[in-house]
Image (cartoon, rainbow, N blue to C red):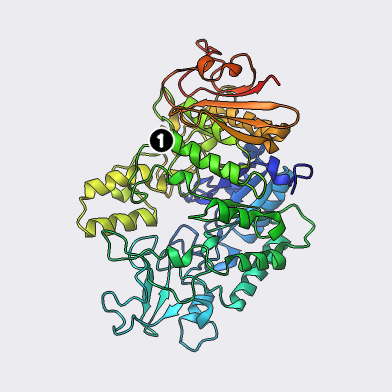
Amino acid sequence: MTVENPAWWTSAVVYQIYPRSFADSDGDGIGDLPGIRGRLDHLADLGVDVVWLSPVYRSPQDDNGYDISDYQDIDPAFGTLADMDGLIADAHARGIKVVMDLVVNHTSDEHPWFVESRSSTTNPKRDWYWWRDAREGMDAGDPGAQPTNWESFFSGPAWELDETTGQYYLHLFSRKQPDLNWENPQVRQAVHEMMRWWLDRGVDGFRMDVINMISKVPDLPDGPPIPGTPYGDGTVATFFGPRLHEFLAEMHREVFAGRDADLITVGEMPGATVEQARLVTDPARAELDMVFQFEHVQLDQGDSKWDRRPLRLTDLKASLGRWQAGLADVGWNSLYWDNHDQPRAVSRFGDDSPAHRRDSATCLATLLHGHRGTPYVYQGEEIGMANSTWADVRDFRDIESLNHFADATARGQDPDDVLAALRPTSRDNARTPVQWDDSPHAGFTTGEPWLAVNPDHVDWNVAAQRDDPHSVLAHHRALIALRHENRTVQLGAFDMLLPDHEDVYAYTRTSDDETLLVVCNVSGIPHPLAELLPEAVEAEVLLGNRDHLPDHDPAVLGPWDARILRTAR
């Protein structure tokens, strides 16, 4: 990929759908594929180029579909393979590509592969997963007898004893999500065959869940102790293992190479550094097109994700600026605030009070979409959906949140304190149903929703914003159209301005033809634009979020004011 011959996805915008919460067609309270098909015109109107579906495969739903029991079937809660084929056809008819979530670090413990693997130590699929004896000198089942000291990402030990064979299996996530052993070539071949099957069916690519964990240090060493817990940090042996690049290159060669189609691959990679992302996304290495990194969404965290701190804008600039510079000549950035695992950005990084919610939502969107990279819009983000209200731990459905509550209170933490930490951080904030209108269940379902609708849907919904030219929805339409139309937004060089300013985020995008200046006041305090960036005052406004207001002053950045400007050359 070069500036002269850019990949198609450099001008594209991706929209993520969490199917369980998007649209329910049959009144059972769970979103489904026919529901998505019925809302495709909303996505076409928004202007997005790609829809990424969180998992819709057959699953026991222990982790809302990220525990897959059959990669080549659709879970009945979401529909049928025929529904999936219809969705792909309907999306393609609107010029929208369909990307599936590829979850191959682990399967469900109900997948036939694991059912065979756990049946005996001599089963041919035994080493399709990671099995180990108890720690030397200890008996299986004794406290601390797990093969390593690793903590699961969903709390508790990362090993589960299987009583049938007396060995432990590795599960970095839920105990119902055993990790596949990618050291076994048969595992890799089975995964490749499944991926080819979906591409042949019309899918346009994959978002690859925690794909940087598929290669593990083979001897599985203990990790450094995690303070305040009996566990150790296993990421030293499970993130970016010794054969990761080999596995990704093999996948590209066996699945994608030689196909006459415009496909896309994006790898979710917790803990990724700029240097690692450059390697993975270097077109010459033929691994992945882009990665999801998490550095910027961890800047407001203390010792854990449950320990939330105020975000310093200077830290955000340093982080995003480093990624922009690091992938300027090689590779490509994914741009996102929200996804199914992150609380809502307008509540987290903006201001969801009535006075500033609309402006802060559009400000954050402008800040992000102006960067070089491919923007990802998560369902509901385009209307400024916010975190919900959680009166009691029983309101939550997320396994990570529920496990953390049980584990933390068992270790003596005050339940009220744990609940207070869950409210702004739980993944369920992202998973409340999409707010289509102001009806009792927000137009999501005619039944009882699997997760309660945010009460604010009576004011914040698609129907209320669809024809409002100044809505959050209209602003997202305009941002997406600008990326489609403007080559400087797509490919122009990025330069950070005002790196030490604590409220104003500003940068330029430059091409041979023009210089664009993006300036965003990420605060509720006005700032004198004429003093900070004099060249901005007389510049041509390509897109603003507050220029329609009667108190708008070109020389002053109002609260949550955001502008994309064309400056004189």
Q: Is residue 347 left or right of residue 275?
A: left
Q: Residue at x 49, y 81 (%)?
A: 117
Establish if 563 lies above or below 417.
above
| Disc 1: CA contacts within 10 A as few (<14), some (14-19) or many (>=20) | some
> In the figure, residue 230 lies in which quadrant?
bottom left
Q: Residue at x 33, y 50 (%)?
A: 303
| Numbered marks: total | 1
Q: Residue at x 34, y 61 (%)?
A: 155
Q: Is residue 555 left or right of residue 255?
A: left
Q: Residue at x 45, y 34 (%)?
A: 314
Q: Which kind of residue does numbered mark 1 sit on?
A: Arg
Establish if 278 lies above or below 446.
below
Q: Quick check: can you spot residue 398?
A: yes
Image position, residue 43 (x, y; %):
63, 39
Image position, residue 405 (x, y; %):
29, 54
Which quadrant, please, contains the C terminus? Answer: top right
Q: Is residue 247 left or right of residue 502?
A: right
Q: Which residue is mark 1?
A: 312
> In the figure, residue 375 lies in which quadrant?
top right
- Kindly give the residue lying farthest to the top in the view shown: 550
Q: Quick check: can you spot residue 337?
A: no
Image position, residue 499 (x, y; %):
50, 32
Image position, residue 526 (x, y; %):
44, 18
- Kindly give the residue lying farthest to the bottom in the view shown: 122
Q: Secondary structure at mark 1?
A: loop
* Residue 494 vs residue 385, the one in the foreground: 494
